[in-house]
């Protein structure tokens, strides 16, 4: 369980987050959605500690994180996996070395154990025979899958995904969404996904949090997202022609 | 108006200096295992040292050749013995050219590479990926580069000194500005062993400055490809200025010790 208490953040004179309160449940895909520039990525970076909030705390199973000592932050971070928007694979390492990297640095496993785990994770995300390839030699969708494999290789308790299907075609997006959903349920991970893609919301969102101008305006199950009476949420959800057709407007 | 602008640049300089000192301090907290650093340091040493050998040899050989020819043409006098030309080449090489000119070349090659690499890692979130894994990205990425540079640059300076003096010898033989015998005699005249120590002290300081300043410039890159290019340029410019300032300071402090 991750609890976000009264998080606020400003950059110079511009306030980006206003007293955000959220709870992310384990074994579920918790989504943070909203239009571009509403502060979703800033909120995610505050949660994982890449940005220090001006006010408020983040708790991981009761352990206060945002203002904790560097040692405690390191301990909590070693229970995290994160998929970045562009994959953030290390350019100088092969796919296998990228996935093995957290094991090399954070564990004392033998080479055989590490290799076995890497191959398992790569198979789990549907990638085989790419171990020796460099990140520049694989497609965008494959990079995302390698990123997921790297994020889950240390068996994390928390998985964070920043725009997991940006820049991908609809079919590959659905595959990535399903993969995140399956992994979340299979391992009972607390997953937090930031996205502005409505297909993702419907595909994998168990709990959806809608952000607008730095505030959470709506929280609920994805099945109820179309029934909300929040105008900003309706404008966001039914912005596309397809969703308008579904609703009949 | 001038005072205000002056105050602002002093303030900016002090702010950058403070940020740089904090950055260096971060290298020594939350470190990973010794083995992790050992492997990375060997990799970085090969990258900054071995891969710079070619350019250092080329530059040093020409440096020695040009110094010999220039000195010879400037010291044509019946009152000056020919071996003095070699003595001048030796002292110029050991005290100034081998450490300082090699450091400037090194800043251009290695400094821009370090800043470009770290800048790209920063803007593509690879640094964030390390932090999220619980790794001190500053220490993990930068410390091995600095150690590698401090270890390898003195070796490059020794190589540069050797090649430069040998280049001067070959030039003397080919052009006939002085004889080989006079050259060999000259490079042994009134030799002060501390000159080599002096060159190595400079090399350690310059090796540290290039790696640390370039890492700092690269690590704080924000934006995109354009800013990565700017960081690389800034890294080379700042490194060169720091090298020249440190060169003056070391000369001021250590030159009095150069007594036979």
Image (cartoon, rainbow, N blue to C red):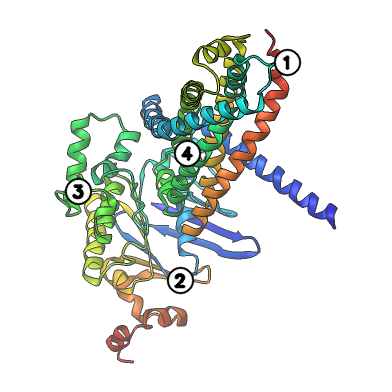
Q: Quickly name the residue at label 2.
A: A36
Indicate the secondary structure of the residue bearing disc 3: helix
In this orientation, which residue lies closer to the viewer: B226 or A218?
Answer: B226
Whether marks 3 and 2 lie on the same chain: yes
Q: Quickly name the residue at label 4.
A: B110
Locate the C terminus of chain B by quadrant.
top right
The structure residue drawn at horizontal position 54% and vertical position 15%, both measured from the top left corner, is B183
Residue B94 percent across, percent down from the top left: 58, 21
Mark 3 vs mark 2, CA separation in Å: 32 Å
Mark 3 vs mark 1, CA separation in Å: 64 Å
Q: Quickly name the residue at label 3.
A: A122
The structure residue drawn at horizontal position 73% and vertical position 15%, both measured from the top left corner, is B256
- Disc 1: CA contacts within 10 A as few (<14), some (14-19) or many (>=20): few
From this viewpoint, is residue A35 visible? yes
Mark 4 vs mark 3, CA separation in Å: 35 Å
The structure residue drawn at horizontal position 64% and vertical position 39%, both measured from the top left corner, is B241
Query: On what subunit does the disc labeled 4 rest?
Result: B
Does A246 sit above or below residue A92? below
Are circles 4 and 3 on residues that touch, CB within 8 Å? no
Q: Quickly name the residue at label 1.
A: B256
The structure residue drawn at horizontal position 62% and vertical position 20%, both measured from the top left corner, is B88
Mark 1 vs mark 4, CA separation in Å: 32 Å
Are circles 1 and 2 on residues that touch, CB within 8 Å? no
- Disc 3: CA contacts within 10 A as few (<14), some (14-19) or many (>=20): many
Query: On what subunit does the disc labeled 1 rest?
Result: B
Mark 1 or 2, closer to the camera: 1
**In the image: residue B16, left or right of residue A160:** right
Mark 1 vs mark 2, CA separation in Å: 64 Å
Mark 4 vs mark 2, CA separation in Å: 39 Å
């Amino acid at each position: 369980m991750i609890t976000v208490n009264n998080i606020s953040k400003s950059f110079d004179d511009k306030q980006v987050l206003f007293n955000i309160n959220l709870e992310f449940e384990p074994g579920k895909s918790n989504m943070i959605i909203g239009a571009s520039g509403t502060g979703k990525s800033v909120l995610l970076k505050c949660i994982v500690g890449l940005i220090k909030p001006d006010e408020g705390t983040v708790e991981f199973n009761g352990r206060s994180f945002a203002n904790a000592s560097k040692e405690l932050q390191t301990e909590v971070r070693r229970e995290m996996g994160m998929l970045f928007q562009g994959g953030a694979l290390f350019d100088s390492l092969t796919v296998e070395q990228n996935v093995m990297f957290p094991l090399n640095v954070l564990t004392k496993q033998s080479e055989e154990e590490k290799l076995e785990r890497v191959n398992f994770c790569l198979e789990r995300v549907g990638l085989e025979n790419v171990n020796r390839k460099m990140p520049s030699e694989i497609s965008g969708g494959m990079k995302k899958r390698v990123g997921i494999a790297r994020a889950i290789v240390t068996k994390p308790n928390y998985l964070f995904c920043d725009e997991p299907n940006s820049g991908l075609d609809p079919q590959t997006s659905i595959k990535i969404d399903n993969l995140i959903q399956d992994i979340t349920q299979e391992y009972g991970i607390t997953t937090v996904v930031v996205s502005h893609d409505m297909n993702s919301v419907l595909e994998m969102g168990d709990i959806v949090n809608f952000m607008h101008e730095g505030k959470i305006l709506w929280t609920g199950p994805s099945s109820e997202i179309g029934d909300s009476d929040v105008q900003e949420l309706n404008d966001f959800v039914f912005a596309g022609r397809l969703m308008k057709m579904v609703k009949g407007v | 108006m001038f005072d205000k602008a002056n105050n602002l640049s002093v303030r900016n300089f002090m702010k950058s200096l403070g940020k740089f000192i904090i950055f260096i301090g971060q290298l020594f907290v939350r470190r990973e295992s010794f083995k992790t650093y050992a492997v990375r340091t060997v990799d970085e040493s090969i990258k900054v040292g071995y891969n710079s050998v070619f350019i250092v040899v080329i530059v040093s050989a020409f440096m020695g050749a040009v110094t010999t020819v220039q000195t010879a043409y400037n010291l044509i006098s019946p009152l000056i013995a020919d071996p003095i030309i070699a003595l001048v080449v030796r002292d110029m090489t050991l005290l100034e050219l081998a450490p300082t000119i090699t450091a400037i070349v090194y800043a251009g090659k290695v400094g821009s590479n370090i800043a470009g690499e770290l800048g790209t890692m920063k803007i593509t979130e690879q640094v964030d990926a390390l932090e999220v894994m619980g790794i001190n990205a500053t220490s993990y990425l930068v410390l091995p580069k600095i150690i590698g540079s401090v270890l390898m640059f003195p070796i490059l300076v020794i190589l540069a000194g050797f090649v430069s003096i040998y280049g001067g010898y070959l030039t003397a033989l080919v052009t006939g500005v002085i004889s080989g015998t006079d050259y060999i005699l000259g490079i042994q005249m009134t030799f002060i062993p501390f000159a080599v120590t002096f060159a190595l002290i400079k090399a350690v300081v310059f090796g540290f400055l290039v790696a640390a300043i370039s890492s700092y410039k690269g690590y704080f890159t924000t934006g995109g490809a354009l800013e990565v290019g700017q960081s690389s340029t800034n890294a080379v410019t700042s490194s060169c200025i720091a090298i020249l300032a440190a060169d003056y300071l070391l000369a001021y402090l250590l030159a009095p010790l150069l007594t036979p």
